[in-house]
Image (spheres, grey):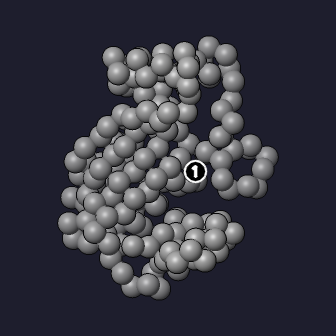
Amino acid sequence: MWGLDIDKERISQLKNKGYNVIYDDVQKFENLKKLNKKFDVIVAGEIIEHLENPGLFLDKVKEFLKEDGILIITTPNMLSLRFIIRHTLFGQESPFWKNRDDEIRYGHVIGFSKMLLENLLLRKGYKILEIRYTIKDEYSGVKGNIEKLISKIFPRFSPNLIVICKIK
């Protein structure tokens, strides 16, 4: 199992604990290419919303999947109840969105709904095996219980998406 990241400090910490982690930009994969490996499963957890060009990422990740390899993507759902309330009703920016003046590359630069992510994956030559809405336990008390209840009744309002796909 291998991991990659753009945070050199985190990589160093993980390597010190014995993990196989390399520094790389997921829109280039220059260092991953040097490993000359293909993988059964690639998990892109909470990555795609940070990319300037998610289509390029989806094109390039194909090089590293085995013939029947699986790509698992997780991302926030921009049509979640949380997003709708925060942005539509109150006009608030999410603290995760990239400050347009910053050079910091960690913020969200694009948002996905189920339909948008599904369309992008299909255009990029992927077969979607499963799409699920999920909820993280970020909120406790009444706020968390309301979000869980609404997400259970109306899954499309859940805060996160998980997509399992493979190359067509």
Q: Position of residue 139 (x, y in %)?
A: 56, 27
Q: Please tell me in which quadrant of the rendered image residue 126 appears.
A: bottom left
Query: At 44% from the left edge and 73% from the top edge, which residue is drawn?
Result: 2
Q: Is residue 117 above or below residue 149?
A: below
Q: Is residue 117 left or right of residue 26?
A: left
In front of the other: 160 or 99: 160
Residue 127 visible from this viewpoint: yes
Q: Quadrant of the N terminus?
A: bottom left
Q: Position of residue 38 (x, y in %)?
A: 32, 76
Q: Position of residue 131 (x, y in %)?
A: 29, 40
Q: Quadrant of the C terminus?
A: bottom left
Query: At 41% from the left edge and 17% from the top edge, which residue is drawn?
Result: 150
Q: Is residue 160 above or below residue 86?
A: below
Q: Residues within 10 Å of mark 1 (few under 14, many from 20)?
A: some
Query: At 28% from the left edge and 69% from the top edge, which residue is drawn?
Result: 40
Q: Is residue 131 left or right of residue 25?
A: left
How many marks on residues? 1
Q: Please tell me in which quadrant of the rendered image residue 10 appears.
A: bottom right
Residue 157 visible from this viewpoint: no
Q: Is residue 159 left or right of residue 62?
A: right
Which residue was labeled with disc 1?
Answer: 50
In front of the other: 97 or 58: 97
Q: Is residue 72 above or below residue 37?
A: above
Element assignment for label 1? helix
Residue type, label 1? His
Q: Residue furthest right?
A: 101
Query: At 65% from the left edge and 40% from the top edge, which residue is drawn?
Result: 96
